[in-house]
Image: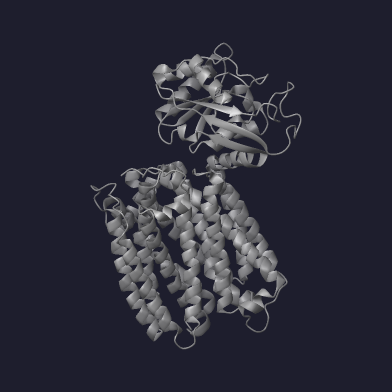
Amino acid sequence: MSPSPEPAHANQFALLGQRRFAPFFWTQFLGAGNDNLFKFAFTVLVTYQLQVEWLPPELAGLVIGALFILPFLLFSATAGQLADKHDKTRVIRFVKTLEIAIMALAGWGFWVASVPVLLGCVLLMGLHSTLFGPVKFAYLPQHLNERELTGGNGMVEMGTFVAILLGNVVGGLLIAVPEVGRHWVAFACFGLALLGRVTAQFVPVSPATDPGLAINWNPVSETWRNLKLAHGQRVVFRSLLGISWMWFFGAVFLSNFPAFAKQVMGGNEQVASLLLVVFSVGIGIGSLLCEVLSRRHVEIGLVPFGAIGMSVFGIDLYLATRGHAPPGAVATVAEFLREPWHWRVMADLGLLALCAGLYSVPMYALIQLRSQPTHRARIIAANNILNALFMIASSLMAAALLKAGFTIPQIFLVTALLNAVVAAYIFLLVPEYLLRFVALIVARLMYRFKVRGDEHIPAQGAAVLVCNHVSFIDAMLLMAASPRPIRFIMDHRIFATPVLGTLFRLAKAIPVASQKEDPATYERAFAEAKRVLDDGELLCIFPEGGITRDGELQPFKAGVMKILESNPVPVVPLALHNLWGSFFSRLGGHAMTRPFRRGLWSRVGLSAGSAVPPAQVTPDVLRERVLALLAA
């Protein structure tokens, strides 16, 4: 089943009015809400109300979190196979039926205040979420196209964290009702499970992507096979590691909120709920911003920005709590809000969470876009396995630091510093993230960059892009405009340029020299260009042969014809507008000598034209197409 066509003038909110998305959205929303209502009510129960000697309050959140994610580690491999082999809608309905049974048992556990029964239900709800996880993320690319994928993921991420917010708030409020709170929680959990099963009935058919798959029921060997499958796609696998790290980071904060509210901030159950409200709203806003900032493409340049913010605001959260002892009496929400430094804590939590949304949504969309459709659910299952390992590791780290005498703010500080180290390592392993980040800065902060006709840049398959060459940062702007990585053929002398040369090497740009100047470099360039197109990638060439010195479009050379001899692929004409006269152009003879020559945020643009079939390509035809785009 191919993704549905994009509706005219649609945005991410318009998806809520469409059957291909809305029933699925509300089903996962209700499931996430129920998970968190149940878990948070249980956490508050053992933190504030029950005295359980073998489960002290400071470890309750960590134990409950670890139990919930254990099934992800054990059964994700099987869940991924089931989602690839069977219609995803059938799997969703089975999982929601299972939720009803689990919540019936949990209701009895709340009614009689049985901690062992409720811990068992935490494990079962973890199994429920394990089965749903691969379906959840494999469903979207089956029904949404590339231009909708970031918005769809943003909506799901926003919905998930709003559900977490509402689930935690409602769970905290209900469990705090004197004498009957546990009973109200029992009714609420069971009711949400029933409602989720009703919405699941309206999810449209999602045919199996690999119906002939033979299920391997051995979780150990299948887990290893899934990890090897994911590892076979380098960018995808390292993106999985990046997402798993985000869950490590987030688990440290989420599992410690009740204890942080009580022991550090001196607040009651409602204060713990308030902090979760702030965190969840931040995640939701960050997730929704992704589509706006990415201009409806999968924009992984947002990921480094999010990672930087996660560390900065995590460190400031620690600094905000230094030198402040909690009051002797437990504070209500009104009393909590009277303290000015508490507002700084909430701002740090909200902005940290917003940055986590910017970090995670593009990564999820990239994995969905780059994974093979027949293996997509198993790749997501591999992600869930890694997530489980990382979250268990986060629980163990937090527990070890608590045992060693660290305070909760100090644990937050350690996590924020680790985030900076891990993010830097991941981005060096996958330079595409850093390159897109730099391209985003150039396109959005240095210039006001507008793209027209970007639908002509192929979302799949090999193609050659040809563009006028106006400045030293033309390649960065083309990176910002394309939803896919581009390999550039560039004059070998540009690699000697400080900073830019390093960026182009990270981008695996292909150095080329004239055949007369350096025959070996010339031949290597075209051999590498052939490999790029053989692999189904995008290749860009600047057919003028160098950066213009007078602002005019120069004659096109025949290099593109040599490329098409071995790979007859479509050629897409591109035209960069208004870069002549900028800091990076050669106006006046030398580039990069007069900063702010055009002021800040000057308008520049890119126009893309329809592809020219390889049989119709000549240098003159391509030059005329680019001239027409420049004149438009």
Residue 573 visible:
yes
**Residue 266 visible in the picture:** no
Residue shown at the point (50%, 17%) measured from the top left: 559
Q: Is residue 464 left or right of residue 223?
A: right
Q: Nearer the viewer, residue 153 or 383?
A: 153
Residue 65 image offset from top left, x and y in percent: 46, 68
Point out the image quarter for the N terminus. top left
Does residue 517 appear left or right of residue 322 in this picture?
left
**Lateral position of residue 209 relative to residue 63, left or right:** left
Q: Position of residue 74 (x, y in %)?
A: 36, 61
Where 353 sits versus 208, above or below?
A: below
Judged left or right of residue 14, residue 607 is: right
Q: How many marks?
A: 0
Which residue is at the far top? Answer: 516
Residue at the far bottom in the pictured view: 179
Percent position (x, y) of residue 590?
73, 23
Look at 35% across and 47% down and name the residue there.
142
Image quarter of residue 571:
top left
* Percent coordinates x, y for residue 53 in the rendering: 48, 84
- Give the quadrant of residue 428: top right
Quadrant (top left, top right, bottom left, bottom right) of the C terminus: top right
Foreground residue, 12 or 122? 12
